[in-house]
Each structure stands twice: as structure tokens, then as C-alpha cells.
Image (cartoon, rainbow, N blue to C red):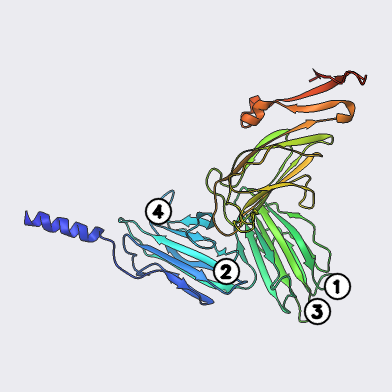
Amino acid sequence: MRSYIYSCLLTRLILKKVSFKCGGILSASSGNISSPNFPSRYPYNSDCSWLIVVAEGSSVHLTFHHFELEHHASCSYDYIKIYNGVAEDEGNLLGAFCGDVSPPQFTSSWNVMSIIFHSDRHVAYRGFSVGYRKDMCGGVLTGLSGEISSPGYPLEYNNNADCTWTIRVSNASLVTLVFLDFQLENNEGCNFDFVALFDGPTVTHRHLGNYCGADKPPRVVTTSNNLLVAFKSDFNIGGRGFKAYYYSGECQQVLVAVSGTFSSPRFPNIYPNNINCHWGITQASGYRVKLFFPFLDLEERNSLSGECDYDSVTVYDGDSQADPMLGRWCGGERPPSLVSRGNKLLVVLSTDRNEAHRGFTAAYLGGKCSPAAGVICYVKTEMERNPWRGSSTVLIFYKNDSDSTKKDRSTKKKKIL
């Protein structure tokens, strides 16, 4: 009986959460983080949280030196989670990792990054060691979309700058890069200050071009899931620099079918923070587009301004954000049905660094309309009730048969297709 009691007490002692110090707030420009007891085995039932905060205007770059945790297909036992910001918001999650394959290098999109380490009560390994440093420019970007800019933008960039960004998205996606602003020292051949683009992760991959001066580089789409952007400046004469957005295939689509559906990234799970995603709908000339939002759940309006200042969905009547805006929505306020004036619509999802929600679903339908010829479009109401059932999506054309006399203005509709 006594041996049984001792056995129970020993089991409780083993399973009891070990008391040790780990985690904290790190504000140095560089440093190292490791699992408790590293390089020995980490304790059972560990929960550690590190918040890395560097100077405003810079980013955090992570590089793993050793990684050895318990393996599980969905990393449900022992794991590391890396966040592009604070860990309390799952919209900041960059990934969860376990096993013995080191996570890739990560660069935050702002000056805060978080690391969470958890171990369960069974099986322990040596753990991990990771180094971080403050980056003023360059890094490895892995988000669905993001922004890169020259140091100090929009102020004049430094002399002798040497920045390299590696943009890496999921294996099934391509990278699109669009320059929003561009002003560098101008010279023939772009040998002094320049931006160089490569269709891959290194300078040995296909060179897409060197750019300088005040003309924005063309829109670039890679042939793989990697893009290398290099910025160099010489010892004198500068400029305002540049600002560019990149998008992965998950965050930018061009939809050309007559009808279709799309949704925010990761739907019905919460969308990532700090993204800017575009869906362009293009129909044949003479067609128009009708757009529906069956579901919308974003961060609420700013209580002070009453505007959608945080996360929002915006629809433009054309193919760019310079075209007329049909509306901007946030919170749970589902937009009404929208109809384009021409054959294109642009839908933009913008999210900030905090508080992610489930996102949205959308459906669209194109139809050829010719009011001048008396042909109008009517979308069957069942489409609005359930746009996800393709068999119920019907576009019907009607022609007006109107009496030309002023006495009788009644209109009869004749179905012609």
C-alpha cells in the first residue's frame, strides 16, 4: 500500500508543471533565444513567450541555429509559433513548427515579433536556438502580401545603402510586385543607385532588370514562388526612394469567368493581419458585373471617426484604385448588391496589425447589357439568396416592348434568352 502511495506521489511530481524562468521582452538590437535547458532536453509542460521589440521603423529578422522538437503532423504536442507582431492576435501567426526541420528565416513587417514555445507532458528533445537582429532594410518576407520601401522613405535614402529582400510565398503561388512610388538617382545604365529584380531567391536566377530615375518599374510577375529585390546606392546624390507592394497568388486574383466566387484568405478561419489583397473581375467588352457579399465579418469601425480605418473591403468601379469607389465596408455590415458601369470591378481587402476576424465571401455574375438597344439585364433572385449554387445562377436577358405613344407608357418584358 505504501509503495502504491509513493508511486502516485512520484507520478504527480513528474506531471506537475516544472517551475523555471523562460520568455520575456527583448529590446536589444540583436540577441539569442533558446528553449529552457538548451542544449539539454527541455522540460515537460513548458509554456514560454518572448516578445521582441526593436526600434520603430526597423524590422526583426529571425534565423534558427538548431531545431529539435517532438514531431506531430499538425504540431499539436510540442511546438513553436512565430507571430508577426503580438501573440494575442492569431491574425499575426506566421506559422507553427515542430519536428527536426528548422523553420525558415523570417522578417517581420514592422518592429515587433513574438515567439511562443509549448511542450506537453510526454517526450522531450533538445529544443531550439534562434538568433534575432534588427534590420533597417531587407529581409525574408513570407506573408500573403506586404510592403517594401527604401530606408527612411519618403525621406531621402542613405548613401551606400545595400538592401536585399527575398520574397517567398507558398509553393503553389507566384509573386506579383507593383511599385507605387519611385525616385532614385538617374543615370544611363542604372549603375549608381538602382533597384535590381531577380526571378528567384538569389542573384544567380534570371535577372529581370535594373531600374533607376523617376519612371516606375513595370509590374512584375514571377515564374516561381520567389522574388529577389536588391537596392543599392552609391556615395552621393540620392532621392526619395521607392515604395512597392507584393502579392501572392492567394492574395491577388484576376477572375475572367462569367460567374464565380471568392473569399478572404483562410476563410472560414480568421484572415491574416497586415495584408492588402486584390481581386480583379474582368468581363468581355459590353458586359457588366454584379457583385454580392453573402457574408462579411471584419474589424468594426473606428469609434472616434466612424470610418472603416482598421480593416475594410473596398470595391472600385474599374480595375484600379484610381477608379471611382463604389463603397467601403467593415464590421458586420454586409454590402448591398453592386453593379459595375463597365466590364470591370476591383475588390480590395486591407487589414491592419491588430484584431483579425473571419473575413468575407463574395460571388459575382457578368452579363451583356445594351440599354440603348432596349436590352436590360436581370439576375435571377435565387442567385442573391444562394450564390454558391452554380446550378441556380441564371442570367436572363429581356427586351423592352414599349408603346411609343405618350398616352400608354406601360412596358412589357419579352424574354429573348
Say which element carries label 4. loop
- Write down the residue under mark 4: 71
Residue at x 42% of width, y 56% of height:
99
The Cα–Cα distance between marks 1 and 2, rounded to whole angstroms, is: 34 Å
* Residue 34 in the image: above or below residue 142: below
The Cα–Cα distance between marks 1 and 3, rounded to whole angstroms, is: 11 Å
> Quadrant where the C terminus lies?
top right
Q: Nearer the viewer, mark 2 or mark 3?
A: 2
Toward which corner of the image does residue 310 lie, by quadrant?
bottom right
Lower position in the chain sequence, tag 1 or tag 2: 2
Counting the numbered discs, the total is 4
Residue 312, given in percent of the width and then of the height, sits at: 64, 51
Lower position in the chain sequence, tag 1 or tag 3: 1
Say which element carries label 3. loop
Residue at x 29% of width, y 67% of height:
19
The Cα–Cα distance between marks 4 and 1, rounded to whole angstroms, is: 54 Å
Please state which amino acid type lies under the numbered disc 3: Ile
Give the numbered dot on residue 187: 1
The Cα–Cα distance between marks 3 and 4, rounded to whole angstroms, is: 53 Å
